[in-house]
Image: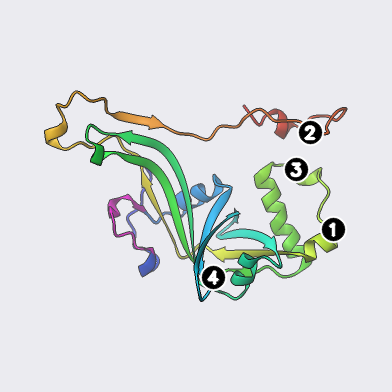
Amino acid sequence: MNNSHTTAPSPRTRIRRIPELASYDRSALYQIIDESYVCHIAFHDGENSHCIPTACWRDEDFLYIHGSNGGRLTKMLLGRRQVSIAITHVDGLVLAKSAFSHTMNYRSAVIYGAFELIEGREQKLAAMDVFMDKIAAGRKQEARPGNDKELAATSVLRISLVEAASKISNTLPVDKEEDLDLPVWAGVLPLRVVHGEPIHANSEGLTTPDYVKNWAQ
């Protein structure tokens, strides 16, 4: 576990519960984001609270998203509304001898701040190219790029990662002393995301690109 016990970047990013699991290390934060495809954005629209899942990617010290200009999430974020963003990877179920000592191994990140709009055609295209590279390196050279109409109907937004914190747990069960002799199995059930075999659609007679051939390896 690569934890850094430096000062939290802001009061609202300071991890209070089990602070020894806190990580304010940028490389740990980047890895959590880069291994995810979806983040959850929480905000209040003045009447109700919402938490919306959406695709995300990172470029340098910013988290990016995109959406339809007319979408509720996009409209809210364009108003520079303060948001909280969560990303979580569950790496294992930790089974202890006592029910109340069970836990999970995980890597999580929370980001605070306000999104800003990426303006300019070339800037939007550059950001979307990074997203395509995240999906599959080399794909942007093959797929039809977005046309002017599609690009104009899409908003690309980013939020700084300056105000962010990670929390990482990677441990074996920790049982109370009075439970250690119980005849109950204890340990970790690992969880991981695996790449399945690609499913071909309307691709007969076409050369399969390397990023598809190697996807499940």
Pointer 2 local density, CA inside 10 Å: few below 14, some 14–19, many at least 20: few
C-alpha span from label 2 to label 3: 16 Å
Q: Give the range drawn in magenta.
A: 13-22
Q: Residue at x 73, y 31 (%)?
A: 210
Q: Is residue 49 left or right of 199 when viewed as pictured?
A: left
User: Which percent across, then down, holds residue 34?
Assistant: 55, 48
Q: Residue 147 carries which label?
A: 1
Number of the front mark, 3 or 1: 1
Q: Where 197 falls versus 75 (above or below)? A: above
Of pointers 3 and 1, the one earlier in the residue sequence: 3
Q: Residue at x 72, y 30 (%)?
A: 199
Of pointers 4 and 1, the one earlier in the residue sequence: 4
Residue matched to label 4: 114
Q: Nearer the viewer, residue 155 or 98?
A: 98
Residue matched to label 3: 139
Q: Is residue 116 magenta?
A: no
Amino acid tagged 3: Arg
SS category of the residue bearing label 4: loop
Q: Nearer the viewer, residue 98 or 192?
A: 98
Q: Residue at x 70, y 68 (%)?
A: 70
- Name the image quarter holding residue 186: top left
